[in-house]
Image: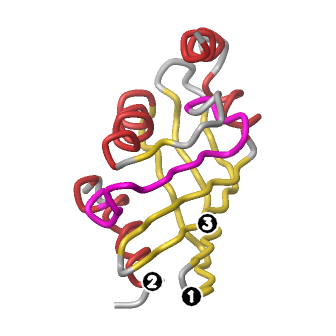
């Protein structure tokens, strides 16, 4: 199976809320980076490992958003790297604000497993949708 197909399957599993299948595509030591200034990763340090990605990303998306969706539009095959142009949509549970943001994902794969992820997104849109309570999260994460 090619790298693009692996990632198409990952996005399809995510769309079906099958997070276990998403995580199964990751190498145990995956290095995951959100965009600079992302509210879930304010210190800029990557999450290392499947459990870190589950706890810091998927658990937060599940508990904080209603209908959070990643819709891939284009897959660009560069061998061991695949770039995916996509869009995020959803409604934040606390603020009721809708998110509709363009994003780009850069995936690195080796031997059929995802070893790295880098996200690019307009984090100002995330802050706007997530609201004022976000400052509390950042202060707690920084401390």
Left or right: where 59 falls relative to 127 = left
Would you call the spot at circle 2 few (<14 residues within 10 Å), some (14-19), or many (20 or more)?
Answer: many
Taking the spot 42% from the left edge, 56% from the top edge, the residue there is 30
- Residue farthest front in this picture: 29
Which residue lies under the disc numbered 1? 79
Which residue lies under the disc numbered 2? 3
Cα–Cα gap, marks 2 and 3: 12 Å
Corner quadrant of residue 5: bottom left
User: Where residue 63 sits in the image (x, y, percent)?
Assistant: 36, 28
Q: Quadrant of the N terminus?
A: bottom left
* Secondary element at tag 2: helix
Say which label, 2 or 1, has the lower sequence index: 2
* Secondary element at tag 1: loop
Of 51 and 5, nearer the camera is: 51
Say which label, 3 or 1, has the lower sequence index: 1
Q: Is residue 143 magenta?
A: no
- Tags 2 and 1 touching, CB below 8 Å: yes
Taking the spot 64% from the left edge, 28% from the top edge, the residue there is 42
Q: Is residue 28 magenta?
A: yes
Cα–Cα gap, marks 2 and 1: 7 Å
Left or right: where 60 falls relative to 107 = left
Which residue lies under the disc numbered 3? 106
Taking the spot 42% from the left edge, 43% from the top edge, the residue there is 67
Magenta segment: 22-40
């Amino acid at each position: 199976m090619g790298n693009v197909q692996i990632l198409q399957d990952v996005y399809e599993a995510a769309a079906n809320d099958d997070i276990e299948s998403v995580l199964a595509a990751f190498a145990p030591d995956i290095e995951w980076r959100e965009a600079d200034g992302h509210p879930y990763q304010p210190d800029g340090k990557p999450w290392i490992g499947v459990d870190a990605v589950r706890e810091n990303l998927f658990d937060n998306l599940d508990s904080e958003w209603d209908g959070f969706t990643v819709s891939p539009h284009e897959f660009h095959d560069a061998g061991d790297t695949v770039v995916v142009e996509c869009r995020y949509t959803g409604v934040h549970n606390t603020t009721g604000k809708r998110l509709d943001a363009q994003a780009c994902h850069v995936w690195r794969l080796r031997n059929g497993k995802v070893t790295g992820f880098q996200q690019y997104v307009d984090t100002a849109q995330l802050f706007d949708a997530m609201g004022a309570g976000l400052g509390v999260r950042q202060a707690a994460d920084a401390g």
